[in-house]
Image (cartoon, helix red, strand yellow):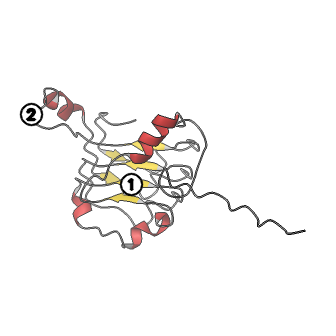
């Protein structure tokens, strides 16, 4: 969890060597103005504006990438290239999110398994809630689709004798 670290940019290979990383929080300040901690969190919150095209290189096991509530204004077409197992991507509340559509080429590398792509609104935290409930946050488990809809292997048909 790297939220509230006053990050401004994510350089190339920033997460080099973190092959087993499953969840990456780069969230900015998501506190409301009426919350007591707003001012303190606003100062500490990430305000990421730029992300290198190779920032996430090598993160083949990443399943959740949270980058909402930042100031990201552009993303290169290859930024999600190594994230074939990504299931959840949150980009809402970033200038770039208003320019993107779910069918854009930038999402091609993650399209096969990413079932939650939040560009305009937050659709929840079902996968993280599932991991917390099942205490499987630290396992290497990977299944296709959202939690609760795990695809099971079909058993071979029984042979009549």
Q: Position of residue 72 (x, y in %)?
A: 27, 54
Asked which secondary structure carries label 1, the reply is: strand
* Image quadrant in which you'd find residue 140: top right
The residue tagged 1 is 89
- SS label for mark 2: loop
The front one of 136 and 74 is: 136
Q: Position of residue 106 (x, y in %)?
A: 40, 68
Residue under the image location 55 percent in, 57 percent down: 144
The C terminus is located in which quarter? bottom right
Q: Please report the residue visible at 51 percent of the width from the left and 66 percent of the height from the top.
A: 112
Which residue is labeled 2 in the image? 34
Q: Which corner quadrant of the image does residue 46 belong to?
A: top left
> Which part of the image, by quadrant, shows the N terminus?
top left
Instruction: Say whether residue 52 is left or right of residue 41.
Output: right
What residue is at 52 percent from the left and 36 percent from the top? 134
> Residue extending furthest front?
161
Nearer to the camera, 16 or 59: 59
Measured as percent of width and height from the top left, residue 114 is found at 45, 60
Q: Is residue 108 above or below residue 141?
A: below
Could you tell me how far apart the alpha carbons at marks 1 and 2 are, in whole angstroms?
27 Å
Q: Residue at x 29, y 43 (%)?
A: 8
From the viewer's perspective, tell me whether residue 88 is left or right of residue 60.
Answer: left
């Amino acid at each position: 969890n790297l939220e509230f670290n006053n990050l401004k940019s994510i350089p190339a290979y920033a997460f080099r060597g973190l092959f087993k990383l499953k969840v990456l929080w780069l969230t900015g300040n998501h506190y409301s103005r009426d919350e007591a901690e707003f001012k303190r969190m606003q100062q500490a919150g990430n305000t990421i504006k730029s992300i290198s095209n190779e920032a996430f290189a090598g993160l083949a096991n990443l399943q959740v990438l949270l980058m909402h509530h930042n100031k990201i204004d552009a993303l290169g077409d290859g930024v999600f290239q190594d994230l074939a197992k990504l299931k959840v991507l949150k980009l809402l509340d970033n200038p770039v999110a208003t320019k993107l559509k779910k069918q854009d080429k930038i999402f091609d590398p993650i399209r096969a398994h990413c079932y939650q792509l939040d560009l305009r609104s937050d659709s929840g935290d079902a996968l993280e809630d599932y991991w917390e409930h099942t205490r499987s946050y630290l396992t290497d488990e990977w299944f296709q689709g959202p939690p609760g809809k795990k695809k099971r292997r079909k058993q071979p048909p029984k042979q009549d004798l």
